[in-house]
Image (tube, rainbow, N blue to C red):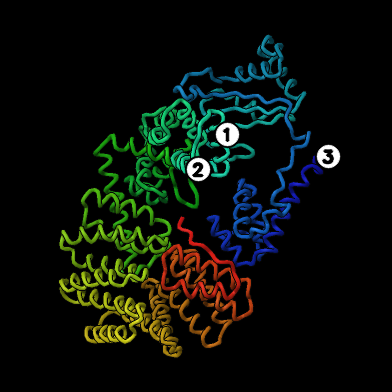
């Protein structure tokens, strides 16, 4: 009963955390909390808010992420910072849970020190474990006994007190008697085994990268011990370069303590010839050097954010041999060279640097892998993106966007202009999702330069369209017009119907920018020209839907609510028809239009329906990205909540809208948002550009 009483504070602590989530967060806010922690609220197994809160706390507790939950709670609800359950220390272990003896044995043949890699005496057989037990428990009779007597003496010695036996690097031990001994340990002895290989044990725990909060404590402690001073930025950089690997963090700080400049140590950290890389990877790589697993590892080094098994198998040239591919990936997992999460395989930064260096040793092999990798993304983009004005598969961008950016960077540096321009279709959409408009303009300017050199007129028109659109969102209409005019000139050089479609597409975006600049008469004239071109040349229904969307926003800004509702409904009907025909569901168009429809319904007094539609659109853009529009949706939702009397919710969404608008540079939207924040009595928010 003593042990049960001692663990009760921990149970109470978790229960109070669950209660805080239930009392202070509604279900939508719990979704946002999960989103901020890279979790899918809908995938939690519980039912309803209570069940989801219970499962969320349990999940994070199992994965040692409660500190991260507390940090988010403090950020979202500052008044909980002084609440008792949030500052309660972890319960102390009861006497029954403490160990009287801890015995460490290691089968590691080398050890990494600040001076380099040193050889060490290692555990090889069961006799070595018996010797370690004898020394730790001061039982000389064990080592003096015969082989037949030793086993019984060791078991008796271990049974006399609560002992923790740690066996490090078990994969290098060949003695089967060691495994048998560990499976039949006498009570109350417990064992912790570390191994690169996956083995059948009672409680397997796979160690990934160390979370930042824990790594921060390690950095502070190691730096203090080595008399090293690191700035917060240097500590963050060290954590990122080390990939959260504690050994790499400790080794780096030791090197700085020896007098090496911090910048030099951080640069050396990813170099394959350094002691840390050789210590971590040389032995593991030697085990797969003649196996397909090696090629899979080298292929994975090309993917900044990992890849699915199908993708990495295709790039490694094993796409059709599923059995060999899967066996190779299992081997990499057993050696802890890859991490697998949500069906994707990733490498830690140190592993990726080492594998990249290994790949570059063989130019022929490197060239083959790179070409396969580039071809994969070219095919992906051409399949899921029709043109610069529309993207069909947002899940692809969420998963592969950063990898596509890496591929574009490579094509720029290698002078592969045609491939670079194909990939630019997805670059703008991904960076828009991420709210990285400044980066999008940098990539766009580079693509415009290359397209001009190669007379790639269609691609040039598409990139100018996107770049001009971004400038217009910033309110920089003169600069936007420079891009638009250059795009129109390029579109005029594209022969046939394709050139007419691109020219009309550009005019639609020009009309949008003109409307945002406040010239409604000129905007309407531009839209009329677009309608005439669509009818004269029988352009696609997609172009018509784009125009209807802009006509709806033109009517909205003119406060012609019936006309706005008509045009937005036209777009929603078109998107639904595309879905039925399986011609690529226009998610961004449909959900963007729904957000506008919600605002129209709000203006016409249908608050409940407006709230339902706006919330649906918000969830889409929160999950898929698209910070600018998510900011606008939060503003509209705040207006709806205000009208429904949900003032606290209105305050939160108004604050979120203003903060996002400040971060994104949406200068034209900020005055209305600022006015709403003031009217609701919410705290003002300073711009956060981090």
Q: Where does the image place residue 287, in percent across and percent down from the top left?
A: 41, 30
Circle nearer the N terminus (1, 3): 3
502 relative to 94 in the view: left or right: left
239 relative to 127 in the view: left or right: left
| Residue 221 badge | 1
Q: In the rendered image of this protein, does residue 310 appear above or below residue 348?
A: below
Residue that badge 3 annotates: 2
Q: CA distance from mark 1 to mark 3?
A: 34 Å
| Residue 581 badge | none
Q: Where does the image place residue 447, in percent across and percent down from the top left?
A: 25, 59
Pick the residue in front: 124 or 252.
Answer: 252
Circle nearer the N terminus (2, 3): 3
- Quadrant for residue 300, please give it: top left
Q: Secondary structure at mark 1?
A: helix
- Quadrant for residue 40, please give it: bottom right
Check disc 3: other Cα within 10 Å, few if <14, some if 14-19, many if 20+: few
Q: In the rendered image of this protein, does residue 379 appear above or below residue 62?
A: below
Check disc 1: other Cα within 10 Å, few if <14, some if 14-19, many if 20+: some
Q: CA distance from mark 1 to mark 2?
A: 14 Å
Q: Where does the image place residue 461, in percent across and percent down from the top left?
A: 23, 68
Residue that badge 2 annotates: 232
């Amino acid at each position: 009963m003593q042990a049960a009483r001692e663990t009760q504070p921990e149970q109470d602590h978790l229960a109070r955390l669950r209660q805080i989530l239930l009392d202070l967060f509604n279900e939508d806010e719990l979704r946002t909390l999960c989103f901020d922690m890279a979790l899918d609220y809908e995938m939690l197994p519980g039912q309803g808010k209570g069940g989801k809160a219970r499962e969320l706390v349990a999940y994070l507790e199992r994965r040692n992420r409660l500190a991260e939950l507390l940090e988010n709670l403090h950020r979202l609800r500052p008044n909980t910072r002084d609440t008792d359950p949030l500052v309660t220390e972890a319960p102390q272990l009861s006497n029954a849970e403490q160990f009287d003896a801890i015995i460490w044995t290691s089968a590691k043949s080398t050890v990494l020190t600040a001076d380099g890699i040193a050889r060490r005496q290692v555990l090889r057989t069961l006799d070595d474990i018996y010797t370690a037990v004898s020394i730790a428990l001061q039982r000389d009779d064990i080592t003096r006994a015969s082989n037949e007597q030793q086993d019984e003496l060791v078991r008796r010695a271990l049974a006399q007190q609560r002992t923790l036996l740690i066996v490090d690097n078990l994969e290098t031990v060949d003695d089967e008697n060691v495994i048998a001994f560990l499976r039949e340990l006498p009570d109350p002895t417990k064992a912790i085994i570390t191994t690169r290989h996956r083995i059948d044990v009672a409680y397997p725990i796979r160690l990934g990268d160390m979370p930042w909060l824990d790594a921060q404590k390690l950095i502070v402690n190691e730096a203090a011990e080595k008399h090293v001073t690191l700035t917060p930025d240097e500590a963050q950089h060290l954590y990122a370069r080390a990939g959260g690997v504690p050994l790499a963090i400790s080794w780096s700080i030791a090197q700085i303590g020896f007098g090496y400049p911090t910048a030099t140590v951080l640069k050396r950290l990813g170099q394959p010839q350094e002691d840390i890389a050789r210590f971590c990877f040389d032995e593991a790589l030697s085990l797969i050097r003649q196996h397909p697993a090696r090629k899979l590892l080298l292929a994975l080094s090309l993917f900044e954010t990992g890849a699915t098994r199908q993708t990495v198998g295709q790039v490694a040239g094993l796409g059709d041999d599923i059995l060999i591919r899967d066996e190779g990936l299992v081997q990499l997992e057993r050696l802890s060279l890859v991490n697998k999460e949500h069906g994707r395989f990733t490498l830690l930064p140190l592993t990726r640097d080492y594998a990249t260096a290994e790949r570059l040793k063989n130019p022929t092999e490197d060239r083959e892998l790179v070409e396969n990798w580039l071809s994969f993304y070219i095919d992906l983009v051409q399949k899921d993106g029709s043109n610069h004005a529309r993207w069909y598969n947002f899940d692809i961008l969420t998963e592969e966007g950063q990898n596509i950016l890496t591929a574009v960077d490579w094509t720029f540096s290698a002078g592969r202009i045609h491939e670079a321009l194909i990939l630019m279709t997805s670059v703008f959409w991904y960076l828009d999702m991420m709210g990285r408009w400044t980066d999008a303009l940098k990539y766009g300017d580079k693509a415009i330069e290359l397209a001009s050199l190669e007379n790639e007129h269609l691609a040039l028109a598409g990139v100018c369209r996107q770049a001009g659109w971004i400038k217009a969102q910033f309110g920089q209409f003169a600069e936007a017009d420079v891009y638009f005019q250059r795009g129109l000139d390029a579109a005029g050089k594209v022969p046939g119907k394709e050139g007419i479609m691109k020219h009309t597409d550009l005019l639609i975006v020009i009309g949008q920018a003109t409307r945002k600049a406040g010239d409604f008469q000129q905007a309407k004239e531009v839209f009329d020209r677009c309608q005439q071109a669509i009818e004269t040349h029988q352009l696609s229904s997609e172009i018509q839907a784009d125009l209807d969307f802009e006509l709806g926003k033109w009517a909205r800004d003119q406060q012609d609510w019936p006309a706005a509702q008509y045009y937005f409904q036209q777009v929603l009907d078109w998107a639904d028809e595309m879905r039925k025909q399986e011609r690529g569901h226009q998610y961004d168009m449909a959900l963007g239009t729904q957000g506008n429809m919600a605002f129209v319904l709000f203006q016409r007094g249908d608050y409940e329906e407006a709230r339902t539609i706006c919330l649906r659109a918000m969830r889409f853009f929160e999950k898929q990205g698209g910070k600018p529009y998510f900011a606008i949706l939060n503003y509209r939702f705040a207006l709806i909540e205000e009208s429904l009397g949900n003032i606290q919710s209105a305050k939160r969404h108004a604050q979120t809208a203003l903060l996002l608008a400040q971060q994104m540079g949406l200068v034209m939207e900020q005055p209305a948002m600022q006015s709403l924040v003031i009217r609701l009595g919410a705290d003002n928010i300073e711009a956060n550009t981090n």
